Amino acid sequence: MARSVTTQRKSLNTFIAWTIGLLIFFPILWTILTSFKTEAQAIADPPVWFFFDWTLENYRVVQERSNYNRFLWNSIIIAGGSTILGMIIAIPAAWSMAFVPSRRTKDILLWMLSTKMLPAVGVLYPIYLIFIQLGLLDTRIGLTIVLMLINLPIMVWMLYTYFKEIPGEILEAARMDGAGLKEEILYVLTPMAIPGIASTVLLNIILAWNEAFWTLNLTAARAAPLTAFIASYSSPEGLFYAKLSAASTMAIAPILILGWFSQKQLVRGLTFGAVK
Amino acid sequence: MRLGKSLVASTALALVAASGAFAQTLTIATVNNGDMIRMQGLSNEFTAQTGIELEWVILEENILRQRVTQDIATSGGQFDIMTIGMYEAPIWAERGWLVSLDGLPEEYDIDDILPAMRAGLSFEDSLYAAPFYGESSMVMYRTDLMEAAGMEMPEEPTWDDIAAAAAAMTDRDNNINGICLRGRAGWGENMAFITTVANSFGARWFDEDWNAQLDSPEWLEAVTFYNDLLQNYGPPGAANNGFNENLTLFQQGRCGMWLDATVAASFVTNPSDSTVADSVGFALAPNRDGLDKRANWLWAWALAIPAGTQQEEAAMEFINWATSKDYLELVAEREGWANVPPGSRTSLYETPEYAEVPFADMTLRSINAADPNNPTIDPVPYVGIQFVAIPEWAGIGTAAGQEFSAMVAGQLTPEQALERAQALVTDEMEAAGY
C-alpha cells in the first residue's frame, strides 16, 4: 500500500516538474519557432505552430546586417575574461575565509553580499564618469572589470561554501608534509574543489553572458556584446518579431549549448553552493 | 604549475582590449526602423565617396534615448551622430548639447526642408537636427469594409464621421473592431495620440502661466470621446496596444480604422506583410465639428551632432549626405519611390514619380496641417503638438499616460483619470519650479 502511494506521488512530482519545466522553456521554444517564420506568420492570429514554410530568411537578413561574429567574440571575451579574473581573486579570498577565519569574516561576507543590494542604476553615473576619465568606455577591458566586480560576491560566496565542506585536516596534513601556501591551494585544495570551482565558473559565465545593464550602457560600437546585438533588432515603427527572434536565438545558442553539456555541474552548483 | 600558467595566459587574453584608434571613423547611433536600415545598407556609397568609415550602433528606442542622453550629459563622446526626435532637439539645443547645422553647404538647400519639420527641429532659428524622415498622423481605413457598410470616408473627416464609421464597421462576430487606437502608457505612446485628440477638442496642457489645464471641460470631453471609441468599437486589451500592436492588428484585418503615424501607410499597403494591402484608404486626421484644429501630430527622426565630438566636420559631411536630395534619389533608384524616406523635403513631393505613391499626397497634407508652434486653439507657452517640449514632459507624460491606460482598461472613469493626472502634473510642475 505504502509503495503504491510512493509511486503515485512520484508520477505526480514528475508531472509537476515537467509542467513547470515546459512552462519555463516555452518562451525559448516560441522564440526559436518564430525565428523560422516570415514576419506575417510571426504575427498570425490564430498563431501557427509547427506547420508553416520554415524559412532561414531571417537568419540570412541578420547575418547580412550585423557582424554577428564580432558581437559573439566580445561576449566570449567579456564573459570568459571577467570569470577568470574573478576566480583569481575569489579563490584565495574564499580560501582565507574558509580556513583562516578571523573575527570579522562573517561581517566581510555579509558586507560583500550587501553590494548586490544596491540597484545597478544607482552607480551608473559615477561609473560612467570614471570610465570617461580612464578612457574605458566601449572597451572590453572596462566591461570585463565591471562584470568581474559585479559577480565577485557570488563567486566568493559559492567558493566559500564549497571550501567549508573540505575538512581542514587535509590541508593541515599537507602542511605537515611541507607544502607551502601556494602548493596547498594549487595541489591540494583546488583538485578537491574542482566540482565547486567548475560550477562557480559556469554560473558566472552565464551571468556575465546574460548581463544586459552594464553591457548596454557602457558600450557603443566596438565592445558591444550579444546583448546589444539583440537590442538592435527591436523596432519602434515596424514589424520585427521574426528577425528579433532569429537574433535572440543566435545570441542564446552558445550559452544554451554550454549549459546543456554542463547541466550536471550547474545543478550541483546551484543546489550545493551558496544559494542552497 | 600548468594551471597557473594557463590562468595567466587566459587572463592576458581577456585583458586584450580593442581600443584601436581608427582614422576617420564615425559612430552613428540609431534605431531599427526600416528607413534607417536602408540608410545603413546604402552607406557604403558614402564611404566610397569620402573615405570616411562608419560604425553603427543600433538600439531599441528607449535604450537609445537613455544611452544618448547619458552620453551627451556627461560628454562621454561615444557618438559622433545620433538619431533624435523632435522632442529632444529644441531642449538639447537650448542646453548647448548639439552642434548647430548652420554650417551645412549651400547646395544642401536648407530651405527645401518642410517648414513644419524645420520649425520643430530648430532653436532660435538655427537648425540643430536634420530630418531623416518625418511623419504626421492620419486616418487609415479599410475601403472594403466602408463600402460594405454603405459609407464613404470624407477626405477631411470630423470626429463624428470617425465615430459613425467605427460603429458601422464593428463586427464582433467576425472579430473586426471598428477602430484601433493607442492605449499603452507612455509619453510617446498613448499620450501622443490623446494629446492630439485634446488639441482638436480645444484643450491644452498648460495655460500661458504654466498652470495644468487637465481639469478643463475640453479635456473631459476629449478623453471621454477617446475612451468611448475604444470601449465601444476598440479591440479587447486596447490598454496594452502601442504602434506595433495596432500595426499587427490592422495587417491581420482586425481593424476597420487606425489613426496613427503616416509612416504606417507604407507598411499596411505592403502586400508581403499585410493581408489588407489592396483595400486601405487614407484621410486627414479628424477635427471637432466647428473647431479649426485637426488631430495631426508631427514627429521627425532626425540626425544631430553632439557637442564635443572630435569629428564635427566629418559628421556634418555625413548628415549632408544622408538627408540630401541626392540621397532620396539614390533610394528611389535602388529600392523604388515608395521606399524613399518621407516627410523631410518639399522637393520630394514635387517629384512626379513620387506623386504616384498612394499615400504621398495625404502624408504631405497631414504634415502641412501640423504647426508645432501653435499646437492648440488657445495660446500655450510651449512648443510641440503631441508633446510639450520641456524636460519634465517625459516624466509627466508617462505618469499621466498610466492613468489614461488604466481608464481604457476599465479601472478608472475619465473623470477620475483626469483628476489624478491634473494632480500629478501640478505637483510635478511645482516641484520643477514653474
Image (cartoon, coloured by chain):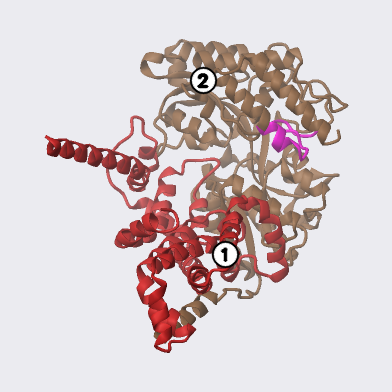
Query: Closest to the observer: A47 or B261?
Result: A47
The chain in brown: B
Residue B75 image position (x, y, % from top left):
75, 60
Q: Which mark is residue B179?
A: 2
Q: Position of residue A158 (x, y in %)?
A: 45, 62
- Chain A representation colour: red
Residue B31 seen in this snapshot: yes
Identify the residue at image location x=87%, y=26%: B208
Of all residues shown, which one is farthest toward the bottom?
A178
A155 horizontally vs B299: left or right? left
Q: Secondary structure at mark 1?
A: helix
Q: Nearer the viewer, residue B163 or A210?
A: A210
At 49% across and 61% down in the image, what residue appears? A157
Residue A170 position by quadrant: bottom left
Residue B384 part of the magenta-drawn span: yes
Residue B277 placement: quadrant: top left
Chain of the residue that carries numbered disc 2 in the rendered image: B
Which secondary structure lies at badge 2?
strand
Magenta residues (range): B382-398
Q: In the rendering, at what x and y percent does residue A249 appear?
A: 38, 53
Q: What residue is pinned by disc 1?
A: A105
Q: Is A109 in front, or is B409?
A: A109
Pointer 2 with pointer 1, Cβ within 8 A: no
Residue plotted at (30% across, 60% down): A264
* Residue shown at the point (59%, 20%) measured from the top left: B407
Q: Chain of mark 1?
A: A
| Residue B372 place in picture, x, y as percent | 76, 33
Identify which residue, B73 or B359, lies in the foreground: B73
The type of residue carrying mark 1 is Thr
- Our reading of the magenta stretch's main secondary structure is loop
- Residue B323 appears in view: no
Q: Residues within 10 Å of mark 1 (few under 14, many from 20)?
A: some
